[in-house]
């Protein structure tokens, strides 16, 4: 179960960062919210009325240590939610890549069985074409993995900076 206040605060920060509605909605879907819930969260984050007091967080008021800790905790929870969303998307992508790999393997097996019959040269050319496409897909997966690792690295650095700031306070 997600904390409503954290989700609302995260949505507000996403909007403040200039992120489009479609990206925000997809992120909320990725963390397991249903379409009706997403609409409520978006309306509340944009300033509409939601359930009474559900999205309200305690104001920072003065810069007391408790208020700063609360703000740091909220930021940490938002970062964890984004991190979780990234991992869910990666797992889904990995499952899709595995499914494609299994299908290609099945096709290669069928082509190998047909290679003994007439039209062997055409089949071999087809296999070569498939191998080229597989190599291209593998390169795309490597590029995606590098991009995800870079994003994770940035997220880790942000988290570390937040911790250092908290320690200084």
Image (cartoon, rainbow, N blue to C red):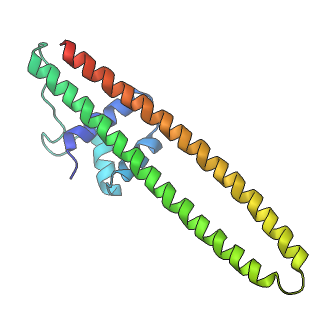
- The quadrant the C terminus occupies is top left
Specify whether 110 is left or right of 44.
Answer: right
Specify whether 5 is left or right of 139.
Answer: left
Residue drawn at point x = 71 percent, y = 52 percent: 136
Quadrant in which residue 143 is drawn: top right
Q: Where is residue 84 in the image (x, y as percent from the top left)?
A: 34, 45
Is the residue 159 above or below the residue 165 in the image? below
Q: Nearer the viewer, residue 40 or 164?
A: 164
Is the residue 80 above or below the residue 127 in the image? above
Specify whether 115 is left or right of 104.
Answer: right
Q: State the count of labels.
A: 0
Quadrant in which residue 69 is drawn: top left
- Identity of the residue furthest to the bottom in this view: 117
Q: Can residue 27 be seen?
A: no
Q: Can residue 92 be seen?
A: yes
Quadrant in which residue 12 is drawn: top left
Is the residue 95 above or below the residue 150 in the image? below
Residue drawn at point x = 20 percent, y = 45 percent: 3
Q: Position of residue 116 (x, y in %)?
A: 83, 85
Q: Position of residue 98 (x, y in %)?
A: 54, 63
Residue drawn at point x = 28 percent, y = 22 percent: 162
Q: Which of 157 and 49 is in front in this view?
A: 157
């Amino acid at each position: 179960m997600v904390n409503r206040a954290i989700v609302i605060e995260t949505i507000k920060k996403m909007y403040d960062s200039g992120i489009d509605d479609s990206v925000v909605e997809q992120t909320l879907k990725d963390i397991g919210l249903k379409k009706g819930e997403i609409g409520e969260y978006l309306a509340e984050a944009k300033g509409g009325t939601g359930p009474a007091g559900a999205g309200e967080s305690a104001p920072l008021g003065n810069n007391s240590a408790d208020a700063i800790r609360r703000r740091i905790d909220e930021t940490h929870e938002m970062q964890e939610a984004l991190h979780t969303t990234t991992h869910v998307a990666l797992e889904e992508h990995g499952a899709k890549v595995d499914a494609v790999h299994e299908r290609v393997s099945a096709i290669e097996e069928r082509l190998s069985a047909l290679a003994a019959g007439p039209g062997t040269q055409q089949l071999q050319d087809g296999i070569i074409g498939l191998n080229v496409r597989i190599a291209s897909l593998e390169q795309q997966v490597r590029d995606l993995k590098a991009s995800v690792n870079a994003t994770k690295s940035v997220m880790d650095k942000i988290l570390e900076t937040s911790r250092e700031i908290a320690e200084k306070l």
